Amino acid sequence: MMTKISPSGFIYADIDIRPRHTVTMDTFRFKVDTGANCTTISIAHLIELGYDEAWILKGKRMMGRAAPVLASGEILKDCYEVILPEIRIGSWVGYNWPFITSLSKPFKLLLGTNSLKFFNWKLDYDSLLCTFELRKNQRNFAFNESGQSIHAIGRGD
């Protein structure tokens, strides 16, 4: 997949997410953030996708050392890891994908290293283009008990 690098140097990736109880996908623009160790989504975006607070509360609560720390140093105590059933990044589809959300902070859409590590990234600042491809041997992997997997669409990778 290829995406443009913004004039300010940021990279954004369009990610399709399957809303709750539908067969269609909604597209969101995520900022690629190599400093974020997790992929985040706001509660407002989850609600837009049909996931309510009761559903979020069924997710894994991030406590102790697992609790996210903001750049300001604030430790968030109301964060949950939620598993979304299907996402698409370029020509790859991922199933049972983990996202972190907060009930009190409006998280930005960040594609963190827990998602970035499955791709090889190439940055070309002369042409302001970023390309990324799924790393070899990343078709199926055990990330959580829900059987997270990723594979190319229609290529049998």
Image (cartoon, helix red, strand yellow):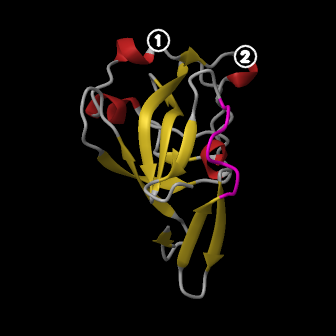
- To which quarter of the image does residue 48 belong? top left
- Does the magenta portion include 140? yes
Tell me the SS state at disc 2.
Answer: helix
Horizontal side, residue 74 vs residue 31: left or right: right
Q: Amino acid at mark 2?
A: Gly
Q: Quadrant of residue 56?
A: top left
x, y percent for residue 77: 59, 18
Range covered by the magenta-colored residues: 135-143
Q: Amino acid at mark 1?
A: Lys
Q: Earlier in the sequence, mark 2 or mark 1?
A: 1
- Image side of residue 8 versus residue 17, left or right: right
Tell which residue pokes out farthest to the bottom in this image.
126
Question: Residue sitting at 53 percent across and 81 percent down?
Answer: 128
Quadrant of the drawing holding the C terminus: bottom right
Residue pointed to by mark 2: 64
Q: Are marks 2 and 1 in contact (CB under 8 Å)?
A: no
Tag nearer the camera, 2 or 1: 1
Residue annotated with mark 1? 58
Q: Where residue 68 sits: x, y (%)? A: 64, 29
Q: Position of residue 55 (x, y in %)?
A: 38, 15
- The image quarter containing residue 154 is bottom left
Mark 2 and mark 1: span between their CA atoms? 18 Å
